[in-house]
Amino acid sequence: MEGLSIQSIWKSFGEKKALSDISFNVQSGEVVALLGPSGCGKSTLLGLIAGLDTPDSGSLFWDELPLAGIPPHQRGFGLMFQDYALFPHLNVRANISFGLKIAGLPPDVITQKTDQILKLVGLKGFSGRDVNTLSGGEQQRVALARALAPNPRLLMLDEPLGSLDRSLRERLVGDLRSILREMHQTAIYVTHDQEEAFALADRIIVMNNGQVEQIGLPQEIYTAPASPFVAQFLELNNILNGEVILRAGRPVLVTAVGDFPIQQSQTQGRVKALIRPDNVMLNEAGPFILQGKILDCSFRGNWQRILIAVNQVELSFDFPSHVETPEVGENVTISIDPARSILIYLAS
């Protein structure tokens, strides 16, 4: 396989297990996001791939050749950090061309490649600018250009937009996606922001406590989170304790908010269940009805989230902003299709 292959990586720091049995592939030209909360092992894994540290056990390969023993500067990988780490005494052009000079390329080639990358990242005309006078977004582009200029086999980005405000971050995510696609750049993007991961990545690897929770396409991760942790990390918080029983020969999910007919007949006994906050209707008849009292309604721009109490259990549901919802304290009816809106997990 062309690209990166990680096979059963383990890493500990003293008594603390940082990574446990991590395995996945990154194919040539693919952008993979490592998504998870702070401290879950994302940056530790990135350091192992870069060669800044070594695993306790397991193997890393590039194009089926082992990376063990190859120092960082010989791996042909690029690394971009959140703080950019620009050289403050060098201007924009000198920062971008630094790696090309280290590689010993001829001056005319350095000039040509630097001009190309400046145009690619939208910094044409910034060549002689002092990096200390640039905005955060402009500095981010310089750091990206410097990482891309040597044509790295693999580009690793560690929370590169984390220090920027949300509006600028959203704009730069789109730009970054276009740049990586245009260059057919193989990349690993580390983030704790699900929206960044969904917008940027071809595939997402969700990590928790040093382990892989789920690997899949962005649509798969969101529509079918593989565990209660993944669901709650994606802000799908309607997780209930329940039990699957057979009633008249058909499986039924019994919960504190009601009994739901389900199709997952292979699961019986104690379970955890996710009721998705979307794919529901407000004040309309449907396959299954929840009735409760509105505790809160928060405006989120083009959508709104209502919090309701059903049998003293709090559930949240999302609707477009144009949908009129009852006032706080009033009763509301939520129509649910269990086949589309309920996921069942084995109880831990």
Image (cartoon, rainbow, N blue to C red):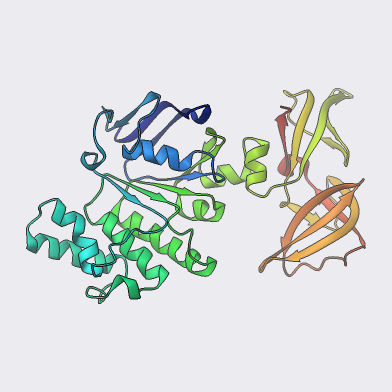
Vertical arrangement, residue 194 with respect to residue 255, above or below:
below
Write the residue at 78% across / 23% down: 268
Residue 70 spot, x, y in % from top left: 24, 33
In this view of the protein, which residue sits in the foreground, 202 or 289? 202
Number of callouts: 0
Snapshot quadrant of residue 116: bottom left
Write the residue at 36% across / 70% down: 138
Residue 9 spot, x, y in % from top left: 42, 27
Q: Quadrant of the C terminus?
A: top right
Q: Quadrant of the N terminus?
A: top left
Write the residue at 41% across / 68% down: 137
Snapshot quadrant of residue 97: bottom left
In this view of the protein, which residue sits in the foreground, 344 or 166? 166
Snapshot quadrant of residue 269: top right
- Which residue is at the far front? 14
Residue 189 spot, x, y in % from top left: 42, 48
Horizontally, is 264 left or right of 174 in the view?
right
Vertical arrangement, residue 150 with respect to residue 270, above or below:
below
Write the residue at 55% across / 47% down: 219
Residue 48 spot, x, y in % from top left: 37, 36
In this view of the protein, which residue sits in the foreground, 253 or 14? 14
Horizontally, is 180 left or right of 162 in the view?
left
Vertical arrangement, residue 261 with respect to residue 92, above or below:
above
